[in-house]
Image (cartoon, rainbow, N blue to C red):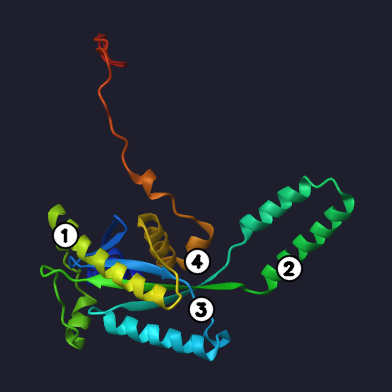
Amino acid sequence: MAANANTHSGKSAQDTLLIAEIKDGIVVMKDGSLRGVILSSAINFDLMSPSEQEAVESAYQGFLNSLHFPVQISIKSQKIDITGYLEKLDALRAEQPNELLGVLMDDYIANIRALVEEVNIMDKQFYVVIPYFPPSAVQKSNSLIDKLKGAFESTPMITVSEEDFKKNKTELSQRMALAANGMTQMGVRAISLGTQELVDLYYSWYNPDVAVNQKLIDTSQLGTPAVTKGVGSAPRGPLPGAPL
């Protein structure tokens, strides 16, 4: 039934994605707008002293007042994969010559494995999305009718020249620097995600179950190798399989 519905609507799963491409650490949307993503750390506000809490609140107020553009705060919860950690422990155990330490390591590894099987150890990551809408970007209406039409129509893709992209990238970078500086004033560490981090983020976000077992390859491996002209000339004999 789902396949038939997709056929009748003429809209594939890829058409529902609003992302056109990811390059230079920037998410390019189909409407020509850009997105930058900042990974931020968390602070334990409850454990702070009253004076520290007041300083954080004042810095947060200043951060909000400094923004002249909208931001989106997203929180992602995911199960922690400690397979690599367990493999490292197994390798250390195999190299451990001390019998007593070996037994203690066996107990520790067994306890960690049992804990992972019984309890889902979750990790929370906080992201701040910074948008930039150039004048050429398509501004869609937020009315209910337009949203319903968008569910059955493909999102038009706007072509942006390399010159315009560089100019828009500069504007977005300034916004991201402003946001990161305001977050630093609150004691929050801010790291701008690069191309590979963005690809991994969206891959795991749209494919949460698959991403656990199937890791995405490095984006540098997706490029086509360049073909260069060698020195000398090729032999002019008959091609393999060609008639003499």
Which of the numbered marks, if any, corresponds to residue 114?
A: 2
Marked residue nearer the N-terminal end (4 or 3): 3
73 with respect to 237 (left or right)? right
Which of the numbered marks, if any, corresponds to residue 226?
A: none
> Residue at horizontal 39%, vertical 55%?
196
Q: What whole-number distance in Å separates the C-alpha atoms at marks 3 and 2?
A: 30 Å
Q: Nearer the viewer, residue 107 or 174?
A: 174
Residue 191 can be seen in this image: yes
Residue 39: x %, y % from top left? 42, 68
Where disc 4 sits, the SS reads helix
Residue count near mark 3 (Cα–Cα under 10 Å), binned few <14, some 14–19, many ≥20: few
Q: What whole-number distance in Å separates the C-alpha atoms at marks 4 and 3?
A: 29 Å
Which of the numbered marks, if any, corresponds to residue 209?
A: 4
Q: Which three-letter amino acid code belongs to the residue tagged 3? A: Ile
Q: Is residue 130 above or below residue 107?
A: below
Residue beneath disc 1:
167
Q: Which three-letter amino acid code belongs to the residue tagged 4? A: Asp
Residue count near mark 1 (Cα–Cα under 10 Å), binned few <14, some 14–19, many ≥20: few
Where disc 2 sits, the SS reads helix
Q: Are marks 4 and 3 in contact (CB under 8 Å)?
A: no
Tag in front: 1 or 4: 1
Asked where in the image residue 121 lies, by quadrant, the reply is bottom right
Number of marks in picture:
4
Which of the numbered marks, if any, corresponds to residue 43?
A: 3
Where disc 3 sits, the SS reads loop
